[in-house]
Image: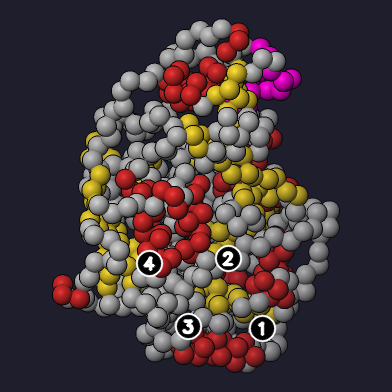
Amino acid sequence: MLLASAVVVWEWLNEHGRWRPYSPTVSHQIEAAIRSSDPRGGSVVLGQVDSRLSPYIIDLQSMHQFRQDTGTIRPVRRSFYDPASAPGQGWQWEWENDAGTWTPYDMEVAIAIESAHSRQQTCLDLTPLGFCYLIDFKNMTQVNRQSQRCRRIQRRADLTYPLVSGPSVSSNGSLPVPGLGQPCSCQQCMLVLSVKTGMGGAGGAGGGIQTLGRRSLTMQRPKNSATASPVSPAASASLRPSQTPSPSPMVMKPQRAPTAAATVCHAPLPQRSSLAGLSRPALQRIAMAQSRALIASGVPTVPVKNLNGSSPVHPALAGITGILMSAAALPVCLTRPPKLVLHPPPVSKSDIKPVPGFSHCCRKTTKKQARKGKTPEEVVKKYLQKVKSPPEEDCTICMEPLGGPSGYKGPGVGPVSKAESVGRLAQCGHQYHFQCLVAMYNNGNKDGSLQCPTCKTIYGVKTGNQPAGKMEYHVIPHSLPGHPDCKSIRIIYNIPPGIQGPEHPNPGKPFTARGFPRHCYLPDSEKGRKVLRLLLVAWDRRLIFSVGTSSTTGESDTVIWNEVHHKTEFGSNLTGHGFPDPGHLDNVLEELRAQGITEEDALVEK
């Protein structure tokens, strides 16, 4: 009998609909719980192997993650990958976030990066995966193709994810025959067989189950799971691949005598010839069976209801209930997660007031006006100092020695004398080929500004490619969570769809504008009004939005946020885009500073 192997990665669903991987240590813990002597077990306590995940419990019966202090529920899934891929070899790929800590990539992205790295590629474009980023392996950076923002990345050795083996699907699509010629009788295999048989009888997939690439058998996301709050359980252990642990997870489960059902499941691993011929209902039925086959049915549950509303007593009740249920060895499954509050209570027109210190309540932008007069060469020379003796270094734009000619051979750049072939940026001191800087300028907005590709210092006034639209702002008589002593500033952005201009990725092609008008909120405090003034500067410079590929939906040629975070949740913080968030205003000021907007640029109302 042929055996197939795969590495198992447990993942959780975040608020953007993306599956985020648990660390290898946590995945080992969950797999150990599945292999325990009584597979009817209940809830796996993640804090047993990672103290940072102490609030979290995974209920294996319902395939959900539960946070005890808030009552938040998120779907989880058990995914299978090639043992030769990044998770099977113990390599983690991570990017540096705004807080200076490292965040792991989604598993499929990490696998693509590791594959390109192993092939010794110099760079990798993540656009086919739905992300507008370029991975530069030589500099170990990630570059946003729209904003040109650069982040560091790292490749880190870690514990390998757990390896599992099982009988593979035969070439004709039939299920394996384990043991003494008898088919496996576990729920998963029986249901896969029944689904396949039913489809064959209906004349649907008579040729067997066809290829669909890597596919995880998971439970479908509940409709109300979109209201769950963000969780950050993707913590990684600092172990090397050779240090394979023997986790002893604490598995909360009823104490029952093992039965014949506790034998090993011979369910086939999701192969590359597994699920393509199945319809969506069939896939859903198989996913349900796969999760329940891991933990046998019959485990009692105690649903917790009536958790509506935004009162702080509800998370407390949810946490107490979760702790009591865990102590009683019961799976933790809430039937109703906390409520998402996107908008404030209805506000009458008479209650809407201007923001104090602002004489207007609306700002419009029009299409970009072409700047005349200076050529690209003249703009670049304005920010450069001459270099008589170039250092023995490479130009970080073309990666050719500064002492030699520029590696750029494209159009739009004329010849240059040897005395002017290398220049030093006046403020930061970084040196480049003059022709490389001109080519970089021509590839941007050509707005008279220049940004150092190494340290991101901005020369001149940076502008973006935000489409024409309208920004409204006013005060409403409601307080944001965490700001009970002041009212709230509501900002309404409205950008219609249109045709891309010469500054956009695909000139002449239509672009979409999803989710407009977009409502955002600030506290009506002194610092909140300071942030609003700087946001107005960013709006005038067309830096709030851009046209590109959405990291949430993967849609291209659409209006997207441009790395200046906004709060779009008024009365809750279940998606991470709400209040309370004590550091939000300072973070926005820092993000605006990265776009070249400081307090000195604060708009003076006319």
- x, y percent for residue 122: 63, 29
Name the residue at 48% across, 31% down: 450
| Rendering colour mode | secondary structure
- Residue 195, image quadrant: bottom left
How far apart are the two marked residues, 4 and 2, measured between alpha carbons? Answer: 25 Å
Q: Is residue 593 above or below residue 587?
A: above
Q: Secondary structure at mark 4?
A: strand
Disc 3 versus disc 2: nearer the observer: 2
Q: Nearer the viewer, residue 421 or 94?
A: 421
Q: What residue does disc 1 label?
A: 252
Number of the label disc, if any, that sits on residue 522: 4
* Distance in Å between CA atoms under marks 3 and 2: 20 Å
User: Which of 306 and 175 lies nearest the eye of the viewer?
Assistant: 306
Q: What is the three-letter code of the residue carrying label 4?
A: Leu
Q: Residue at x 63, y 58 (%)?
A: 9
Q: Kindly report which numbered mark, 2 or 1, lies closer to the viewer in this rendering.
A: 2
- The residue indicated by pointer 3 is 334
Does residue 85 sit above or below 534 in this rendering? above
Instruction: Identify residue type, mark 1.
Output: Met
Who comes first in sequence, dot 3 or dot 4? 3
Structural distance between the alpha carbons of marks 4 and 1 = 43 Å
Q: Amino acid at mark 2?
A: Ser
The magenta region covers 390-404
